Image (cartoon, grey):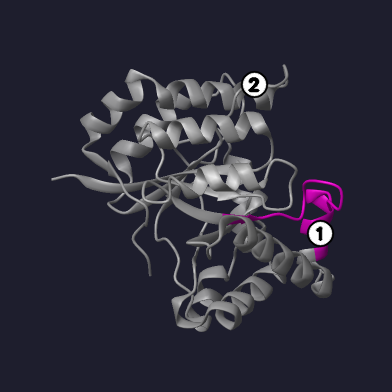
Amino acid sequence: MNRSLVLCADDFGLSDDINRAILELVRQGRLSATSCMSLMPAWTADAAAQLRELETQAALGVHFNLTEGEQAIPLGKLMQLSLCGRIDTNRVQSSLEQQLDRFEHLAGRTPDFVDGHQHIQMFPGIRRIVLTTLVRRYGADHPWLRVSTPALQGHDARFKALVLRLMGTGFNAQRHRYGVRGNRDFAGMYSLRPDAGFDRMMRHWLDTLPDGALIMCHPGYASSHSALARARDAERAWLAGPRFAAALRDSGRLLVKQPRLD
């Protein structure tokens, strides 16, 4: 019997090269969700229209962002403000509403889910704003919210995973108090280096994650020689190729649009 899996590409809208890769992979049946950075330059009417044509094949979400672009807050500073209880809640609220508004304006629909660039939806102070906004804005039929709690093994970013688990302490308890649904099982975190062994990690996740899990990924065409751009290109090439198709088949996985929620 097949085990279901959501494979979600983050960062749609960040650049044309990322958009092109994600659209191609969705059309090939190699992705089942993508999350959109709706205030970034490549979130355009044309890009949104192309994505909307694929909504039967992939869930479409909002990739809530505070750390990229003209009004960015450096991640380290945002984490410090969050842990110290000094988040500018008005700024966070306004930005979230703008991003939801712009997604809905160009996509012509509400998002299926919400997650966060660099997992900011999990951070203290920010998560309460996200939770209250989803409940107030959408009611009982709210988008589900990504739970980005990483394992400490099966990848090459143990310290990064430890930090995120610290930042996300209490997230699920608070989410449940607000009655907001989220995925139960998550993977996809790694160093985002081109030599990290994406093939090996993906095979491990496909083999070991429970039914209904969510894996995030970051495919793109390389627009520069940076390590991140080359890692994106390596992901894209592997996901588009025969080894991923074989890995899906060998692990008995079926790509679906919605993870198992709680």
Q: Nearer the viewer, mark 1 or mark 2?
A: 2
Classify 20 as above or below 2. Answer: above
The picture places residue 107, in percent across and down from the top left corner, at 57, 56
Q: Nearer the viewer, residue 178 or 105?
A: 105
The image quadrant where one finds the C terminus is bottom left
**Reading the chain from its start, which is encountered first: label 1 or label 2?**
1
The picture places residue 47, in percent across and down from the top left corner, at 60, 42
The picture places residue 197, in percent across and down from the top left corner, at 49, 22
Classify 251 as above or below 147. Answer: above
Q: Which residue is mark 2?
A: 222
Residue at image x 62%, y 25%? Answer: 193
Q: Secondary structure at mark 1?
A: helix
Is 74 in the magenta?
A: yes
Q: Secondary structure at mark 2?
A: loop
Classify 196 as above or below 26. Answer: above
- Whether residues under marks 1 and 2 lie with C-beta atoms below 8 angstroms apart, the answer is no
Q: Is residue 72 left or right of residue 201?
A: right
Classify 123 as above or below 175. Answer: above
Classify 10 Å Cα crowding around label 2: few (below 14), some (14-19), many (20 and above).
some
Whether residue 197 can be seen here:
no
Whether residue 173 can be seen here:
yes
Residue at image x 38%, y 20%? Answer: 241
Q: Is residue 206 left or right of residue 239?
A: left
Q: Which residue is mark 1?
A: 80
Q: Nearer the viewer, residue 122 or 217?
A: 217
Q: Which residues are magenta?
A: 62-81
Classify 10 Å Cα crowding around label 1: few (below 14), some (14-19), many (20 and above).
few
Q: Amino acid at mark 1?
A: Gln
